[in-house]
Structures are given as structure tokens and as C-alpha cells.
Amino acid sequence: MILLDGKELAKKIRTEIKEKVAKLDPKPGLAVVLVGNNPASEVYVGGKVKACDEVGFVSKKILFDETVEQADLMRAIDDLNQDKEIHGFIVQLPLPDHINEDLIIDGILPHKDADGFSPVNLGNMLMHKNTILPATPKGIIRLLEEYEIGLEGKHAVVVGRSNIVGKPIALLLQQKNATVTMCHSKTKDLKKVTKEADILICAAGKAHMITKDMVKRGAVVVDVGMNKLEDGMLVGDVDFEHVSKIASHITPVPGGVGPMTIAMLIENTIECYELAKGFKH
């Protein structure tokens, strides 16, 4: 079994970006908007701000109370859209129930959309046009490429159909010539489908839902899940202890997909910076 070490690859990517940023003036700027005090979100945001500082970005963290009104949040997004020091920004999800996430994401200018969630960027991805890709799916593809895992002609199974991970990773895998099956909560006999996967992407957000008997021997397993147990332990969607005994490659949690998401966010901000400077058209 080979461990897909996202932490090590992310470190390498950040080093390359730091060298690039050292030659840039002005420096690229990334802002993160955080609403409320969701512990998982705070951890993610902390990691993103730390990565920004490490590579030499200008970083800005904007905090709102959980009771913030939609209009106030939209005003903050408008301000960031106009801020010349900020080249890319994200609004950390999930948002409180009274906030319309779609309106918030729609409000981010596509060329400042460091997360790659805007309808324009997702539409460009569908058309296979040059675009800012969603950070987590982009990170998964990069991780597979780093370990020279061929995708062409392989059967890839994606468990989970979110707009953030499931749908975009399925599309990117198709664009790499994999044959893709998407599974979700309504899939009948999930075990039968996952057992056929050469490459299994787990992004359902349910702790240890993928067990050893659901995985084909020699499969590549990518675990996107980040679930907190009652004892505070972070685990993925995959039962790592047992599945790792039959997988050919597997990502750990933490240390697999998470660091790659942050690295791709930083890389996307460089792309936003270049778009703003007119280096890309």
C-alpha cells in the first residue's frame, strides 16, 4: 500500500509558489470571509491564512457574527470585488441557515473566485475552457498525477454529489478519460458499485461509511471526508485501518486531501492575480 501524502505534495507546491511570489510586485492578496464560529471552519480558515503568510501573500480575514444579515454579507463581498489589493477571495462554507449560499457565491466576481465555485467558473469547467477550478477536485487530480496513477480507461466511482466536490471531481475524471459512476444516498446496493471501482473517491461526509468489504483489492482510494467523532478525533469517510490493507494507494485523514485543497486555493489566487494583471485572457 502506498500512502498518497497530500501534506508533502502541498508543501512542495507552496515552496514553488513562494519562489514565484518573491518576484511579484505588488504581492497577490487573498481574503477569507468567515461567518459564525463553526470549529471545523475555523480550523480551515486558520490553515488558509497561515499558508498565505507562508508564501508571502497579502491576507485578510473578515469575521462576522452568526446573526449577520444577508445584505451586510453582500456588502462585504462587493467591497472585496472592488478591493485592488485582494485578487482572490472565498466565503467559507457552510453558512448559517438564514443566509442564501447561492446568492453569496453568485456575488463573487468570477475572476476573484479563488474557490472556483461561481456558476461562470463551473460552467467553463463543464465546457472544458480555461477556468479557475474548484480547489478540492483540482487537488485530488494533482495528487493522483503526482503518484503517476493513470486515469484513462479506469472505472472511477464517486460517492457524494455535492457541487463543491462530487460533481466537479466526476467531471474532471471524465475529462481525463476515466469512466465515471456517481453514487449518492439513493443509490441501490452501494457496496456492489464501489466494489467495481479502480479509483474510489469518497466525499459523502459520513464517518467510516466505506468499509473493507466495499473496496476492490488493489483499488486507489481517495478520502475527502473530514468528520469529528465525539472524542474529538478527526476521521474520514473511509475505515482507513482496514481498507488500507487491501488498497494499492490511499489518502490519510488528516494529511491527504485537506492540505491539497489549501495548496490549490493558493495556486488559484495566483491565477486570479494573473487574470487581474492581464497575463491571461
Image: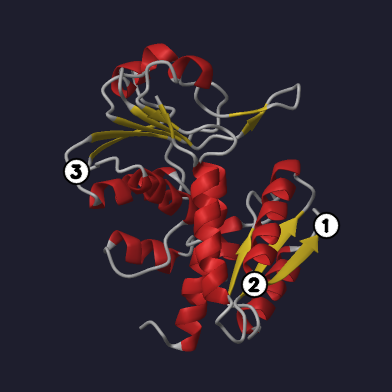
Numbered tag placed on residue 57 in the rendering: 2
Q: Is residue 31 left or right of residue 128?
A: right
Query: Could you tell me if residue 40 is visible in this image?
Result: yes
Q: Quadrant of residue 153?
A: top left
Q: Nearer the viewer, mark 1 or mark 2?
A: 2
**Residue nearer the viewer, 85 or 187:** 85
The quarter of the picture where the C terminus appears is: bottom left
Instruction: Note whether 207 is above or below 83 in the view shown.
Output: above
Sort mark 3 into few (<14), some (14-19) or many (20+) by Cα contacts within 10 Å: some
The residue positioned 52% from the left and 17% from the top of the image is 241
Q: Position of residue 266 (x, y in %)?
A: 55, 63
Numbered tag placed on residue 65 in the rendering: 1
On the image, numbered disc 3 is attached to which residue? Answer: 152
Q: Amino acid at mark 2?
A: Phe
Q: Position of residue 38 (x, y in %)?
A: 75, 45
Sort mark 1 into few (<14), some (14-19) or many (20+) by Cα contacts within 10 Å: few
Q: Amino acid at mark 1?
A: Asp
The quarter of the picture where the N terminus appears is: top left
Name the outermost residue toward the top.
213
Instruction: Note whether 139 is above or below 25 in the view shown.
Output: above
Sort mark 2 into few (<14), some (14-19) or many (20+) by Cα contacts within 10 Å: many
Marks 1 and 2 close (CB-CB < 8 Å): no
Q: Nearer the viewer, mark 2 or mark 3?
A: 2
Q: Amino acid at mark 3?
A: Glu
Q: Is residue 111 left or right of residue 197?
A: right
